[in-house]
Structure formats: structure tokens, C-alpha cells
Image (tube, rainbow, N blue to C red):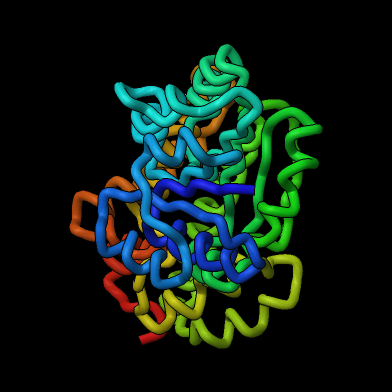
């Protein structure tokens, strides 16, 4: 199987690395950043143009910022889709609006090309160690054929329905993550303002019902003042914009999402857009005039 991979950012590079480590050696890569391409060539991939990827690969994987970039790469002038052969497959691991996924799938279907939308959860750390969670939409036969490939990059790959279901599931995931981070920041702020060490509160509650993967990952970062990005505020803003667009389209109430979006927009406006999304704590620190845990 010949694989093409387009989009070699924070997530894409380690995903390529894990595919190669799993024994898939015929892998072509493409990105605007020559440095990123060179890194992946160092892993064992081969550099290629998007045209070469479309013409020669059995499966094309993208990991791009948002809907416009995926549509441009696939459907734009000289887009990959125009070179793909019938029977090939497109797997989009980007987190985009599910309506865009369905639009792209419709164009590809007319060319005899199948599509899976397969966004991921886990951020850079899980991309590096190959334990991402894939949320997948598409035909069951296609999912079954490519689940093994997805599991070279992740610990789980779950089919959630037809094309668009993967990104709908990812939007649901991003609601839960954002609101959970906000709750952790709010709780630790309360603790510190009430004179109780946030670290003690974290250790006391993490094993109970309030405990979560989000708390375990983000509370220590808040307490240490570490905002090195595993998943950037600006990327989460992008995802929540997609949540709000999708919710408005289907008539779903999302008041918590709208509220946490305002906090993230404040972070962006105050120079924290490239920080980890745990920087939601900075909003509370600003309002409460504290530094959590410090």
C-alpha cells in the first residue's frame, strides 16, 4: 500500500513517524514547510508534490488546520482529488466542520474515491507516543480496511457513523475538553482564594468523581505556570467556531460552549493564542489577581 501524507505540523510529523515505525515504508509526504518535509524524510519518508501523491498513492491522509485548507488541498485548482484514481481512499485527520467533510466526500464519490473523516484527540504528546484516539466517519467496509493503518498512530479508532460523524464526534469532544479545563481552572482559583493549596486540592479530588484525563493533564500545568502548547488556544478557538457553526445549523443549544469561547477569545486578544489551552487559567488569574499554585 502506497500512502501519501499532507500536513506535517505539530501532529503530522509524529504521525508520519509512527506509520513508518509500524512497517509502512512506501510513504510520500508534502508540506509547505521544507523543514518539516526534511524531518520526515529523515524518518524514512519520501518527499513528493501533491500531484505525485494523488497520482500514485492508494490512500491520501491529510492533517491540516481547518476546512478551507482541506478543501483547497483536495478540491482547489490542481487539488489532489483531480489526480486520484478510482478505488483510492482519502482519510482526513483534520478537525473541520462536518458539513465540509460531507461536501468533500460528495465530490470525491463522483470520482470513485472513498473518504473517511478521522479527526483525533490527544494532542502532541499522544501523537508522539502513538496513542491518539480516532473518531471516524465513513463506510464500514472502508473503515475496516484502514483501521489497522489508523492504529499505527493511535490507541483506538472508533467508527461513529457515515462521513461527517467523525468530525461531529470531535466537536463533542472539544466541548467536553474546553469546559473541563475551565472547570479545573475555576476550582483551583477558588481553592487558592480560600487559602487552600491548589496542589493539595488536585491530589485530593483527582481520584474521585471529579477526576478526569483533562484534570490529570492540565492541573499540573496550571499549578506550575506551564503553558507550553500541546494544543494551542487558537486551535481550540477554531474547533469551537466549528462547534458553534454546526450547532446553529442543526439547532443544538450550546450555551456552555459559547461561554468558554468568550474566555478563549479574551486569551487570544491578550496575546495568549499560541499558549496551551490550559492557559484558560490565566483568565481566572487575571480576574482573581493571583497566580495559581504560586
Q: Residue furthest top?
A: 110
285 sits to left or right of 190: left
Q: Position of residue 106 (x, y in %)?
A: 56, 15
Q: Position of residue 241 (x, y in %)?
A: 40, 34
Q: Is residue 247 visible?
A: no
**Front residue of this view, candidates 126 and 89:** 89
Residue 91 position by quadrant: top right
The mark total stands at 0
Residue 82 position by quadrant: top left
Q: Is residue 51 above or below residue 134?
A: above
Q: Is residue 88 above or below residue 15?
A: above
Q: Residue at x 59, y 79 (%)?
A: 202
Q: Position of residue 228 (x, y in %)?
A: 35, 73
Q: Is residue 270 above or below residue 167?
A: below
255 sits to left or right of 112: left
Q: Residue at x 73, y 57 (%)?
A: 156
- Quadrant of the rendering where the C terminus is positioned: bottom left
**Front residue of this view, candidates 180 and 213:** 213
259 sits to left or right of 78: right
Q: Residue at x 68, y 33 (%)?
A: 137
Q: Is residue 37 visible?
A: yes
Q: Residue at x 62, y 60 (%)?
A: 24
Q: Is residue 25 above or below residue 224?
A: above
Amino acid at each position: 500500500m502506497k500512502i501519501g501524507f499532507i500536513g506535517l505540523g505539530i501532529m503530522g510529523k509524529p504521525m508520519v513517524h509512527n506509520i513508518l515505525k509500524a512497517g509502512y515504508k512506501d510513504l510520500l509526504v508534502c508540506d509547505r514547510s521544507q523543514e518539516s518535509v526534511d524531518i520526515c524524510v529523515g524518518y524514512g519518508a519520501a518527499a513528493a508534490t501533491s500531484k505525485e501523491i494523488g497520482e500514485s498513492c492508494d490512500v491520501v491522509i491529510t492533517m491540516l488546520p481547518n476546512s478551507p485548507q482541506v478543501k483547497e488541498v483536495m478540491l482547489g485548482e490542481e487539488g489532489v482529488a483531480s489526480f486520484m484514481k478510482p478505488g483510492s481512499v482519502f482519510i482526513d485527520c483534520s478537525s473541520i466542520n462536518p458539513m465540509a467533510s460531507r461536501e468533500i466526500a460528495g465530490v470525491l464519490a463522483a470520482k470513485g474515491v472513498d473518504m473517511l473523516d478521522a479527526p483525533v484527540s490527544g494532542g502532541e504528546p499522544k501523537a508522539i507516543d502513538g496513542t491518539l484516539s480516532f473518531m471516524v466517519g465513513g463506510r464500514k467496509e472502508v473503515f475496516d480496511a484502514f483501521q489497522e493503518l489508523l492504529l499505527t498512530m493511535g490507541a483506538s479508532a472508533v467508527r461513529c457513523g457515515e462521513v461527517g460523524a467523525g468530525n461531529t464526534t470531535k466537536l463533542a469532544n472539544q466541548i467536553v475538553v474546553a469546559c473541563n479545563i475551565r472547570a479545573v481552572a475555576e476550582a483551583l482559583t477558588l481553592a487558592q482564594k480560600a487559602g487552600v493549596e491548589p496542589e493539595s486540592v488536585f491530589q485530593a479530588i483527582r481520584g474521585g468523581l471529579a477526576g478526569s484525563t483533562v484534570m490529570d493533564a492540565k492541573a499540573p500545568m496550571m499549578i506550575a505556570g506551564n503553558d507550553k502548547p500541546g494544543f494551542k488556544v487558537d486551535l481550540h478557538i477554531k474547533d469551537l467556531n466549528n462547534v458553534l457553526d454546526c450547532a446553529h445549523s442543526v439547532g443544538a443549544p450550546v450555551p456552555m460552549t459559547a461561554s468558554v469561547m468568550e474566555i478563549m477569545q479574551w486569551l487570544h486578544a491578550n496575546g495568549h493564542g499560541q499558549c496551551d489551552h490550559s492557559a484558560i487559567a490565566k483568565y481566572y488569574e487575571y480576574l482573581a489577581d493571583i497566580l495559581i499554585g504560586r
